[in-house]
Image (cartoon, rainbow, N blue to C red):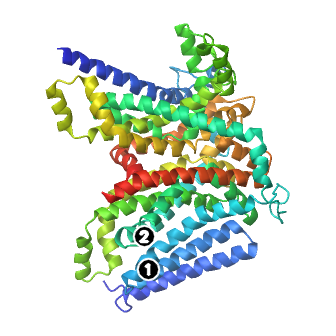
Amino acid sequence: MNRRVTKILLNLAAILVVGIWVFPLYLMFSSAFAPGELLSRSAFVLSPRLTIENFLFVVQQFPFIYYLRNSLTVTFGSTILSLILGCLAGYSLARFRIGGNTLAFWFLSTRMLPPAAIVVPFFMIYMRVGLTDTLVGLIIAYMVFNLSFVIWMTRSFFAEIPVQLEEAAMVDGCSRLEAFFRIILPLTKNGIAATAVFCIIFSWNEFLFALILTSSKQAQTLPASVNTFITKYWTSWGPLYAESTIIVIPILIVSIFLQRYLVRGLASTTLK
Amino acid sequence: MSFGDGLPRRRIAQFIFLALFGFFFLLLLQELRNNNTGGIVTYSLFAFLVIYFFFLITRVDMTDNSLKFFLIIPATVLLFLVSIFPFIYAVVASFFKIGGANLRRAWPFVGFSNYVSLFTDPLFWDVLARTIEYLLVAVTLELVIGLLMALLLNKVRGMFSNIFVIPMMVAPIAVALLWKAMLTEQGFINAFLHSVGLPEPVWLSYREVIYPFLSLPPFYLELARKLNMTYGFFAILIPDIWQWTPLVALFILTGIKSLPPDIIEAAEVEGASSRQILSHIILPLLRPVIGVIILIRVIDVFKVYEYIWATFREGIGVRTLNVQLTVLLFRTHEFGKASALAVLTLLIVSALTMVFYRTVYARTEKL
């Protein structure tokens, strides 16, 4: 009896904690769908009346399509590029004695650098060569984090596959690379997909590089464009909430579907 | 089917690759004539990838020894270009006087004066103090709350812990704006405090939090002022805690789950209370896990930018190293000084990553 009461109490406490963590997001969504006149009085609305006027405002009054295009290009461009180069390098690190642990750790350590410090030389170099406000400039800048992450993750995935599998394929007449493409890659595709999702989430959410290295709708991404809605004296909450919702929703959907991988990924990102 | 009967398959692949390469090369030439750097970089990247895969696929007879370098070199070169090269560039630039006007021209050499002006500027020490304060308070709170959350989540179903993945996936800028909205004077937090009958502080201000210090001797009040214990400081802490405590909790939870269950059972059989089990068995066994997560969080907190930017822009009262860097870059255009500060920050973080390497990585690799 006493045990059951504790159990119920613990569950209630867990629900409360989860509530505290989920409530701000709920507030964001409900305010994003709230009518504008309510938002002029208060910075949040738990409104029973839903409208999409904020979203319409964002999409129509604002070069939203450009920002969306830039965000998508940069996200997928940098993810694909880092997957291609990262898988090959990860395979090389996993199978051959090359550079030892030091090289592998160097790959990881670039991910730990604070973007605000890295962006200073980036900004100067880009200004000199004329890469500011270009999409390819942003894609290359995101390599600092994505490429190192992909190398690090794929290295551990490939190392888990027994070498004998490849050797058997090579006895059967495959070259080493064919063995890699035909046997190792299909076996590790789940892990690689999870890695890709992490890269996508990172590039989609990235803010500082986008803020500093881009300046116009030519290359600015969605997160950096929220700048427009906040001035020093006035914040238009409605469009801001709508814009945040647009940024958050795709990632939320992805993370709900891929939860299992993400929990594993988050745990292994850092430790392994 | 007859496709490729006359020609060997490899010939067709070679032809396609060469045609693609030629296509990108032509585009590259055009961009070179237009002097458009973005286009030049894009098309040389494409052309390189085509040529690279051409060699990768056609040269099947490559030995392992050359293959390993062939596979790793593109990634290494690219990572070198985006991490080591900028670092060296910043080190060099930190010895020159660079402003907005002469960024693209010759830079006058000024020796160590950027560093000297950095260290003699009281603002730098303030900024450093704010950063360390933020680091200490954020990591401590996250650790304490995360540990409690992990202990709670350990007792309930796994469904709850899955929900906690969500906050980490949300864009930090969206989190920052959301909490800014919650903490404004018309925001939810104050409305909630009002309805409960508590005082409503002005969160987004540099006013000191003095309630807990009023009853203490004036010395502590002075200390609180010195340490910048303002509402604004807590306003930029809250989003970080909201977003990253779940990571700490999930990490510790994995640690708890991987503890050998027989030890805990044995202690239960011996008649230890659950508090004794916690303080004498679980916590000591979790020490390495907690050490790792502290290091991870310390390295991550050095990246915090969005929360401060969204709430205060370059607000002088809550300026951390990252904010100061962007101020030097964007507002005052002192690129030389910004480089010096960037070099210092990178050195601090590199030292931390070295600690990480020595304590965590080297140990797990040996196992």
Give the quarter of the image for residue B225.
Answer: top right
In the rendered image, residue A40, in percent from the top left (x then y), is placed at 67, 22
Please rate how many residues cluster around mark 1, counting C-alpha atoms within 10 Å: few if below 14, some from 14 to 19, many from 20.
some
Please check whether the numbered discs 2 and 1 fall on a single chain.
no
In the rendered image, residue A262, in percent from the top left (x then y), is placed at 38, 46
**SS class, disc 2:** helix
Q: Is residue A179 visible?
A: yes
Residue under label 1, please give it: B56
Work out whether B256 lies above or below A98.
Answer: above
Task: Residue type at mark 1: give it.
Answer: Leu
On the picture, is B123 further left or further right than B269? right
In the rendered image, residue A97, in percent from the top left (x then y), is placed at 38, 73
In the rendered image, residue B306, in percent from the top left (x then y), is placed at 61, 40
What chain letter is assigned to the residue under label 1? B
Residue lying at the far left in this picture: please name it. B269
Q: Which label was assigned to residue B326?
A: none
Residue at image coords 70%, 56%: A123
Q: Do the residues under discs 2 and 1 have CB atoms within 8 angstroms?
A: yes
Q: Which label was assigned to residue A88?
A: 2
Work out whether B69 lies above or below A261.
Answer: below
